[in-house]
Image: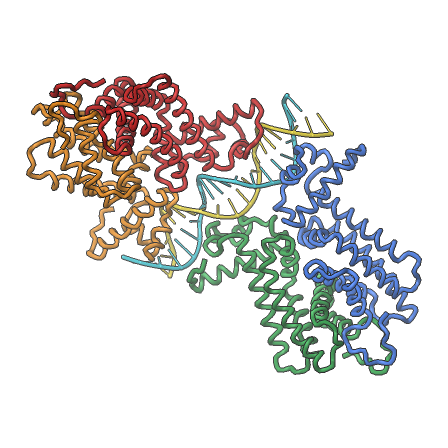
Chain colours: A orange, B red, C blue, D green, E yellow, F cyan
Amino acid sequence: MNRRLTTRGKERRRQLLEFATQRFADNGYHPTSVAEIVQGLGVGKGVFYWYFDSKEQLFIEILREAQQDLRRTQQQAIEGEDDPIARIELGIRSTMLWSAEHENYYKLTQFAITEERFLPSLRKGQEVAIKDVMRHVQDGIDRGLIRDTSADYIAQGILGLSTQLVRVFIHEKHRSPDEVADEAIALILDGIHTGDRSAAAPI
Amino acid sequence: MNRRLTTRGKERRRQLLEFATQRFADNGYHPTSVAEIVQGLGVGKGVFYWYFDSKEQLFIEILREAQQDLRRTQQQAIEGEDDPIARIELGIRSTMLWSAEHENYYKLTQFAITEERFLPSLRKGQEVAIKDVMRHVQDGIDRGLIRDTSADYIAQGILGLSTQLVRVFIHEKHRSPDEVADEAIALILDGIHTGDRSAAAPI
Amino acid sequence: MNRRLTTRGKERRRQLLEFATQRFADNGYHPTSVAEIVQGLGVGKGVFYWYFDSKEQLFIEILREAQQDLRRTQQQAIEGEDDPIARIELGIRSTMLWSAEHENYYKLTQFAITEERFLPSLRKGQEVAIKDVMRHVQDGIDRGLIRDTSADYIAQGILGLSTQLVRVFIHEKHRSPDEVADEAIALILDGIHTGDRSAAAPI
Amino acid sequence: MNRRLTTRGKERRRQLLEFATQRFADNGYHPTSVAEIVQGLGVGKGVFYWYFDSKEQLFIEILREAQQDLRRTQQQAIEGEDDPIARIELGIRSTMLWSAEHENYYKLTQFAITEERFLPSLRKGQEVAIKDVMRHVQDGIDRGLIRDTSADYIAQGILGLSTQLVRVFIHEKHRSPDEVADEAIALILDGIHTGDRSAAAPI
DNA sequence: GATGAATGAGTCTTCATTCAT
DNA sequence: CATGAATGAAGACTCATTCAT
């Protein structure tokens, strides 16, 4: 499926991807039928199979494009910043913003975990993300700014905490991404302990 | 479906729950058919519907029983401990242990998030868990042991970070629950900043 | 299935017949399951198959007993009356009364017509009924009281008209059986033409 | 299920309706499976659900179209006739003819009565039919041609008697519709009493 | 006599995919 | 490119009936 697409074709493809993302996020992957998707766009079934080999491949495509888009956003955000802690912070903020604007993507990811056949797609993206974070964490450790534990743990912790906060606070409680990012960063940098120490200045 | 079950009946029901959990976790909810489940136990299709109203209700039942079991485990773990920080720590440790022993449950939860109809079941359990954690967090704040931010954020952060670490380190990287718990607790209590402060003594 | 039944056994059998009649009439034969019937009586499934060979045979039994009962009622009603017109009238009246009290039976009959396998049961009863009416009609013709057309047509007409009026007026419009019977008899005896004749005295 | 159908599509739909009508009439609604219907036409199972939402809805559709068709036939028959008695007569005759040609429809109606969920469909048609007849009856009463009883009773009586005669004589005994119509009309107009009156001229 | 449990063929229905036009 | 139509395997679920206890 490597069709040369006209401008109109690209537009169609985009419509399909977006509509499907919405339905998958709302109803789930399996409960959403191809028929439903094409009906939603008011086109025939042939259209779907013109642009995608299968429903499965469509889903994988959605994951791939989202991962790409998020990463591009993060990279733009940290561009030019040298301090690793600041880069982590910027990364978290940009992730929060992107997530707030793409809340559907979260559910798709959750689902992808649950079926063997989608794991490869997912892992590819996750590994890239972890590596990105780990680079900054390691840099921070090297410069004595971050506790010298396994960068791995820390990177995963950052991702996990961010993910949870995004989900709960932005999507469910409708807080602003910035506000949530502040809290996430504070927790990540300083933990939950009271700041009654000499130099404990939460950002 | 509130049948009075004989001993044998209870046993069957348990078999079905366990086998289904396994298959759902391995293959996903939708790809696992009722036929597959009953074949796995070598019984007729009617047996399934003798014990459960539907495949959907079976899944909900699995979630419910797991939530109950985890909570019981946590409560036993913190029983008798008074210090809120220690209670949080014990809670995290017992959760890690339980999760390590019930890794299937994690996938089921992930999946449940992705379909509207399972969300209510999930939320019920989550709310209870958050309330449990928040109680200790608030207690810690009151005693000046925990930074006085919204207990809500902190509780969610704790859950999110724990969940992520469990997933990645225990299930994917096969570390021991204790080791992972140590790291989780350190991160939660003190964040990622270096400990170059006067009184930075992680519990 | 010719069990020697104890008093208690006969009572059980009767309960099953009555409850099943009700359900069949309300919901239809097929949509009513054996499980539903035994649950309604709060007994196990074994009980059902102790008294009846099958669901089909139960249904046939219901038809048979109802036909018997109706016929007994009619015969008691016309006993001692000699005038054929009066006998027809009494037959109609008793049928109306019986029908009003056994409205369920009507639906069962309707249904039985629609499945080949129940037709024999039905026909047996119908033939008896037609013969009964025809005897009186023929008698009336012989005595010059009834128009000398085919007794067959007349008998069928009487049954059809009665049946329809019972259905519509007693069951759907809740008129009294007597009132409806008056109308049925008038229509049958004198048709719908105006009574502007010399000797038009409806009985 | 309001698909825009091509010519071929309409043809298919018609085939399905007709074949199903036949099978339902022969075997009964429940004993006839969707599989049987599609096999009978040599098409795949999906075809059925392309044209109908469900087996139930197909049945309802059959009833609806038959009612429509019968009514159209009756209206064409009485068109141009002014005398109410003659209109009733023409209505009866056309009904007999239509019924003789659509004997399957009778069984379907019988069955529909027996399940709650089909009653609404049935009633709708019945009400229309009754209203049609009542209009003529009332007209006849107004002109002094029909006995001044409740038009309701008379209309119902006409329908009931006609229905019964159709069933028994045309379908079971294979008389000609005309012959049966003659008898029905005679019975309806003049009842069963002897014609020994001054002006008793059955039409 | 009676019960809970089990059977498994059979039912309706869905849906990804293909194809003729 | 696009559509309506068709396919048919597969799925969830039902239910009359049987059986061990």
**Residue F21 falls left or right of residue B140:** right
Q: In which quarter of the view is residue A81 placed?
A: top left
Up the image or down, A103 lies above or below C155; here it is above
Q: Residue at x 22, y 47 (%)?
A: A2
Q: Quadrant of the N terminus of chain C?
A: top right
Q: Residue at x 56, y 23 (%)?
A: B8
The answer to whether residue C156 is visible is no
Q: Quadrant of the C terminus of chain C?
A: bottom right
Q: Residue at x 36, y 33 (%)?
A: B126
Q: How many marks?
A: 0
**Residue C152 falls left or right of residue A167:** right
**Residue D42 falls left or right of residue B175:** right
The answer to whether residue B66 is visible is yes
Up the image or down, A107 lies above or below A38; here it is above
Q: Position of residue B90 (x, y in %)?
A: 31, 19
Q: Position of residue B83 (x, y in %)?
A: 30, 19
Q: Position of residue A47 (x, y in %)?
A: 31, 54
Front-most of C138 and B63?
Answer: B63
Front-most of B82 and B23?
Answer: B82
Q: In which quarter of the view is residue F2 placed?
A: bottom left
